[in-house]
Image: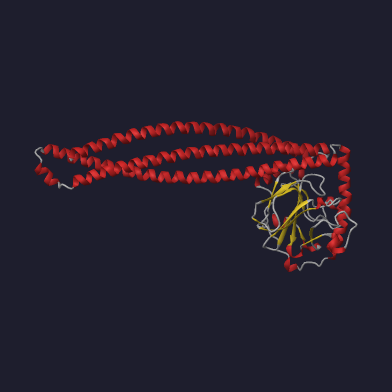
């Protein structure tokens, strides 16, 4: 029985050494291949990010040029190139994350194999010790004809017990390491899910620019004079629409001041991602502000210079200049109150494609001139959810988002025709949000 114990101890040490060596060697080779793949993708990502920065510089330069058909189409094309590069970055990040998952999966499988091997050898060794312990030591000594052999077996048993104790500690550490690797897999999967979501977003943006370009080409027949005529027509129709809308707003009952939410910085988030807003800071010298605002709320210089368009009442939101196809995000959690497209009514140049979200705090936010609408009435959205993509539908001489804030208590969704029987304006049959004058709020009172 004692000799069996010694053989078990020797087998235990040699077996673990051989198995551990082969597993580590195979895993090291696999890790080297995966790391090489990740390094290659990282280099590709760096190159693409430099390319994207170049596109952003081009877009900044184009935004300061006089708006022509050529510059509009060029802006759309550069935006498409930038978006395509961003898609390539995300695809490389997905490949890198998948490689990491593969590597982690191999590490976990190896660790589980090592743990299973340790458990098997430990169990066998413990059974051997238990069997040997059934004969009392004093009985073994007196029944043996070789006193030195007994003491040697006792010493071997002590050494094996110490080895088992050490390996149990190793097994415990391996289990902890395995738990850490499994947690890392979860983190990588979450990262991969985020990448995939961003990929869907960017592909949506790419589709939005394609639609916008085709629409512009169709409207102008690729002729500069047609483009200028389109802009002039939009401006004339906008004047007619704003006059009719102003009359309607003046006739609506004012919202009680108690129903107007108190202003405060940070109540609303900017309707674009942090990356977009951070890029706006590089355009301060061109736009005069770090938020890409091209027109403010109220009696701005543009509104004053174009009093006929705004009926002397000023601009009822802020305009944020961003390339066509930029994902537009909900400024606060809420319910999509309604969506619409005034361009479906011939001769109506106003909001174009629009979305309005009602929030629990008594505010409603308006997103207009979209190229694509990604939500529907009644849908619940959270802060930061993509509700559409920026464009230049409706009355817009360049790509931007019209962002408005309303006191929800005063908002109605009407057509001018339904309210007053008006059939003289191009927008008489277009449904849109309307409100009394005091229900239009300055977005900056809730953003900054």
| Residue 294 relative to residue 189: left or right | right
Q: Relative to 203, does residue 383 appear above or below in the rendering?
A: below
Residue 87, image x, y percentages: 65, 38
Residue 119 vs residue 303, the one in the foreground: 119
The residue shown at (75%, 67%) is 257
Question: Which quadrant of the view contains residue 427?
Answer: bottom right
| Residue 114 relative to residue 299: left or right | left
The residue shown at (35%, 34%) is 19
Say if residue 311 shows up in the picture.
no
| Residue 352 relative to residue 17: left or right | right
Question: Which quadrant of the view contains residue 430?
Answer: bottom right
| Residue 206 relative to residue 239: left or right | left
Residue 333, image x, y percentages: 65, 57
Residue furthest right in the image: 424
Residue 380 vs residue 406, the one in the foreground: 380
Question: Which quadrant of the view contains residue 126?
Answer: top left
* Image quarter in which the N terminus is found: top left
Residue 65, image x, y percentages: 81, 38
> So how many labels did they put on this image?
0
């Amino acid at each position: 029985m004692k000799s069996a114990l010694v053989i078990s101890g020797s087998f235990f040490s040699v077996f673990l050494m051989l198995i551990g060596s082969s597993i580590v060697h195979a895993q090291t080779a696999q890790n080297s291949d995966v790391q090489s793949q990740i390094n290659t993708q990282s280099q590709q990502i760096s190159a693409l990010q430099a390319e994207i920065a170049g596109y952003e510089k081009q877009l900044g330069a184009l935004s300061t040029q006089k708006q022509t058909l050529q510059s509009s189409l060029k802006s759309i094309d550069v935006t498409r190139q930038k978006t395509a590069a961003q898609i390539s970055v995300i695809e490389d990040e997905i490949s890198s994350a998948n490689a990491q998952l593969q590597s982690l999966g191999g590490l976990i499988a190896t660790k589980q194999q090592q743990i299973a091997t340790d458990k098997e050898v430990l169990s066998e060794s413990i059974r051997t010790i238990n069997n040997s312990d059934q004969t009392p030591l004093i009985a073994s000594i007196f029944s043996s004809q070789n006193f030195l052999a007994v003491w040697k077996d006792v010493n071997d048993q002590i050494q094996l017990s110490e080895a088992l104790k050490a390996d149990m500690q190793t097994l415990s550490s391996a289990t902890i390491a395995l738990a850490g690797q499994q947690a890392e897999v979860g983190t990588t999967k979450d990262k991969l899910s985020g990448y995939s979501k961003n990929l869907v977003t960017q592909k949506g943006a790419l589709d939005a620019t394609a639609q916008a370009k085709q629409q512009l080409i169709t409207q102008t027949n690729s002729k500069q004079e047609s483009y200028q005529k389109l802009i002039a027509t939009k401006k004339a129709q906008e004047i007619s629409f704003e006059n009719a809308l102003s009359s309607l707003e003046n006739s609506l009952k004012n919202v009680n001041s108690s129903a107007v939410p108190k202003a405060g910085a940070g109540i609303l988030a900017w309707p674009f991602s942090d990356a977009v807003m951070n890029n706006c800071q590089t355009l301060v010298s061109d736009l005069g502000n770090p938020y890409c605002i091209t027109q403010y709320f109220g009696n701005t210089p543009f509104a004053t210079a174009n009093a006929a368009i705004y009926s002397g009442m000023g601009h009822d939101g802020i305009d944020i200049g961003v390339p066509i196809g930029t994902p537009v995000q909900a400024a606060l959690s809420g319910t999509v109150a309604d969506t619409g497209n005034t361009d479906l009514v011939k001769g109506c140049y106003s909001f174009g494609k629009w979305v309005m979200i009602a929030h629990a705090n008594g505010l409603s936010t308006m997103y207009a001139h979209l190229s694509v609408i990604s939500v529907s009435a009644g849908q619940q959205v959270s802060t930061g959810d993509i509700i559409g993509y920026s464009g230049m539908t409706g009355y817009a001489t360049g790509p931007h988002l019209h962002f408005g804030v309303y006191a929800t208590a005063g908002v109605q969704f009407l057509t001018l025709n339904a309210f007053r029987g008006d059939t003289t304006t191009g927008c008489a049959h277009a449904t849109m949000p309307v409100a009394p004058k005091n229900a239009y709020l300055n977005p900056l009172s809730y953003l900054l």
